[in-house]
Image (cartoon, rainbow, N blue to C red):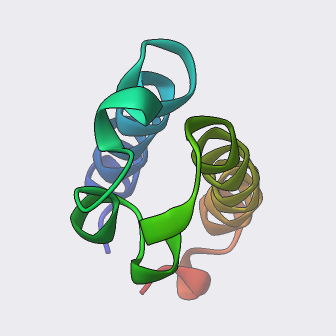
Amino acid sequence: MALWLWCTLFIGYSLYCWWIIGYGGAHWVVGWKSWFFIDWLALDWTAEQIRMYVLIIWLASLVYFILGLWKPELRF
């Protein structure tokens, strides 16, 4: 995968996480919409639980992104 695509995808995902965590996206996603935007497990979660889940997944994605910058063979 090209470096520009790798960075663009991560920036887009980070903007999505930023919206969920900091700008009320979690309150908008609560309920049946969480199945489409988060995961099917999130159907019964509160906004705070959704925010925590997205934060943890985003931090894991950040580690994977940094690893992919140094070792391009990890990008897939």
Furthest toward the top, the residue is 23
Rendered view: 56 above or below 38? above
Q: Quadrant of the C terminus?
A: bottom left
Q: Residue at x 62, y 67 (%)?
A: 68
Q: Quadrant of the N terminus?
A: bottom left
- Of residue 63 and residue 1, the one placed in the foreground of this image is 63
- Of residue 5 and residue 37, the one placed in the foreground of this image is 37
Q: Residue at x 73, y 45 (%)?
A: 52
Q: Residue at x 60, y 84 (%)?
A: 74
Q: Quadrant of residue 69?
A: bottom right
Q: Residue at x 23, y 56 (%)?
A: 33
Give the image location of residue 31, x and y in percent. Answer: 34, 54
Left/right placement of residue 12 relative to residue 69 reads: left
Left/right placement of residue 31 relative to residue 20 reads: left
- Of residue 44 and residue 13, the one placed in the foreground of this image is 44
Give the image location of residue 20, x and y in percent. Answer: 45, 32
- Of residue 55 and residue 65, the one placed in the foreground of this image is 55
Give the image location of residue 21, x and y in percent. Answer: 56, 27
Rendered view: 65 above or below 29? below
Rendered view: 55 above or below 60? above
Q: How many marks?
A: 0
